[in-house]
Image (tube, rainbow, N blue to C red):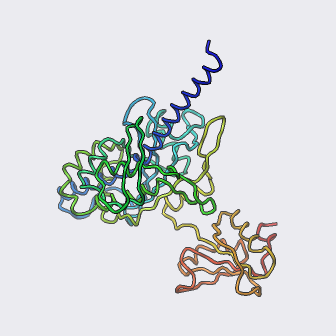
Amino acid sequence: MLSPEEIEQRKAELEARRELKRKYRRRQAIIYTVAVIFGLILMMVVARYSYRQAVGGGTSNSSVGNDRLHILVLGTDNFAGSGTRADTILVASVDSRTGDVGMLSIPRDTRVWLRPQNRWDRVNAAYAYGGPELVMDAVSHLLNVPISYYVQTDFEGFSKIVDILGGIEMVVEREMIYEDKAQNLYIHLTPGKQVLDGEKALQYVRYRDRLGDIALVDPFKGEYAGRVERQRKFLSAVVDKVLSPGVITRLPQLISEGLKMVKTNLPWDVVLNLAVNSGKFSPDRITSAVLPGNSQVLNGAWYWIVNEQKAAQLVDTIIWGKPEPLKLTVLNGNGRSGVAQQVANLLREAGYEVVSLGNAQHFDFRETQIVVAEQDRHRVDELAALLNAAILVQSGDGQAAGTATIIVGGNFSSQRSVGI
């Protein structure tokens, strides 16, 4: 029988091994995301090349409709094997008509309901239990978004493909130095503009600063930062390089390596439709975000618990392509103490985004007003009904698009607004 000291030592050793594994998985997560998007781009380039070779250009006869295409993107340790879990999970929403692409990253510890197992679990565990199909089912119900297709990749071949492309030009913001002999990881990048080869590109996307993979840096605005920002910059550079005319000369090598990276159930006509329209895609039309929420311990285990209200708003903008919520400024126009804060609280409870408070130019406003740009006029009808407010449209530069200013007048009644 082990002594209490030996038991504690064993526990400490086990926890140390677990922590080492967690660090390794966190480092891998960002790499998988880059590889997945890289694979998607390669698929489009390959399909476009094949299409042009076959028909010499023209319009696709694809049966794909005009609806946005929702694709589950998975990054795993390998394509098969028992116990494999998905370390990177995101939903890509693609509109081939406009070239708009939305990417919603789902933290791998997100708590989801697994219907076949009839229990709650982490979303990354769903892959081990039922492969991509179970992850699609869980994420579809989590987001209330129908998802029928997936793209999966592991990381093999990524470095070689970067070298085939001739490297990726990046601006390294600061000196990046990190060593982990246990994982055979050595990062040493000097700051400045440079072309990263495959090995250096790996170092760039793997480097983890004090913010980690995801950090909620501004809870009020819901802003996240950390290694994900470097990922986004790298992806933009990759898009520029892969979609450039010069890449066509490297297609044979890219096809050979790219097909090793990607596993998918996307029908060929869907891929072809994306390829034919790939000229519409560009970095400035790609938006990405992290599924909002917070970490919480339930039954002794850490989970990412989704903020359902904020998630619903984000799904509308990222997945369905709806305009972002109006950013509201609330001004006190009647002189009653605290009325601007009172209205701001009311609006936030109703799901609106209030970004600032203040006083109007004077306190003689008898009627509450909503000042809005002409293109946003149709978006404030419910808000006007909630506050019993008049709508004032300003043309030109009077009111920025995507914003609205609420001037609280003397007719404002908190009891009427909340239906009392």
Q: Position of residue 105 (x, y in %)?
A: 49, 51
154 relative position to 314: left or right:
left
Residue 67 visible in the picture: no
Q: Which residue is drawn at 50% across and 42% down?
A: 137
Quarter in which the N terminus is drawn = top right
Q: Where is residue 152 in the image (x, y as percent from the top left)?
A: 38, 43
Looking at the image, is 229 positioned above or below residue 128? Answer: below
245 relative position to 127: left or right:
left
Q: Which residue is drawn at 52% across and 47% down?
A: 107
Q: Where is residue 60 in the image (x, y as percent from the top left)?
A: 27, 60
344 relative position to 71: left or right:
right
Q: Where is residue 400, by image quadrant?
A: bottom right
Q: Where is residue 385, by image quadrant?
A: bottom right
Camera-nearest residue between 382 and 252: 252
Q: Residue at x 40, y 47 (%)?
A: 31
Q: Residue furthest top?
A: 1
Camera-nearest residue between 345 and 201: 201
Residue 334 visible in the picture: yes
Camera-nearest residue between 129 and 381: 129
